[in-house]
Amino acid sequence: MVVHLVNVGRRPVVLVLYGGSEAPTSWRERLWPRKRRWSANYFNPNPLVLEEQRHHELRITKHDTIGFIPNGRDIWFNTMWVSDSRKRRYEIPGAREHIKKLWEKPKAS
C-alpha cells in the first residue's frame, strides 16, 4: 500500500509518527465504545519535514498493519493515521479497505 503525504498548507509540517488503531471486536464495543488501543512507529531516523507543496510516499506493508502494545498483545490495525509534531492526527482515507486487500490470499488461477 502506498500513501502519498502532501503538505497543502503555507507552513512546514513535521511528521513524527505513523500508526493505527484496532477495530471494535464485539457488538458490545460497538454499542458502548471504549478508548481504542493504538500503536505507532516513528519516521526513522529523523522526523519527516514537508515544506509547502512537498510530498512524500509512505510504503506500508502488511506487517506494518500489526502493532504491539506494552501488555504483550498484538493489535491488528483497522484504521491508520499520520501524526505531526503538534499531535494532530491525519486519518489515511480508505485504510480499512486497503488493509483488507493486503491480507487477502492471492486467488489461484
Image (tube, grey):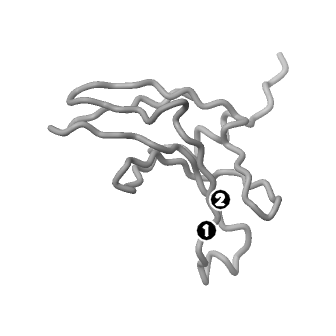
Q: Camera-side residue: 99 or 85?
A: 85
The quadrant holding residue 34 is bottom right
Tag 1 and tag 2, C-beta contact below 8 Å: yes
Outermost top residue:
109
The quadrant holding residue 86 is bottom left
Q: Is residue 6 left or right of residue 101?
A: left
Q: Residue at x 54, y 48 (%)?
A: 80
| Amino acid type, residue under disc 1 in the picture | Arg
| Amino acid type, residue under disc 2 in the picture | Glu
Query: Can you give x and y, in whole percent of width and height, for residue 40 in the image?
Result: 59, 49
Query: Can you give x and y, in whole percent of width and height, for residue 79 in the image?
Result: 56, 52
The residue pinned by badge 2 equals: 22
Query: Can you give x and y, in whole percent of width and height, for residue 72 in the image?
Result: 82, 59
State which tag comes first along the sequence, 1 or 2. 2
Q: Camera-side residue: 12 or 4?
A: 12
- Whole-angstrom CA distance, mark 1 to mark 2, is 7 Å
Q: Residues within 10 Å of mark 2 (few under 14, many from 20)?
A: some
For the C terminus, the quadrant is top right
Query: Can you give x and y, in whole percent of width and height, for residue 10 in the image?
Result: 15, 38
What element does badge 2 sit on? strand
Q: Residue at x 78, y 25 (%)?
A: 106
Disc assigned to residue 36: 1
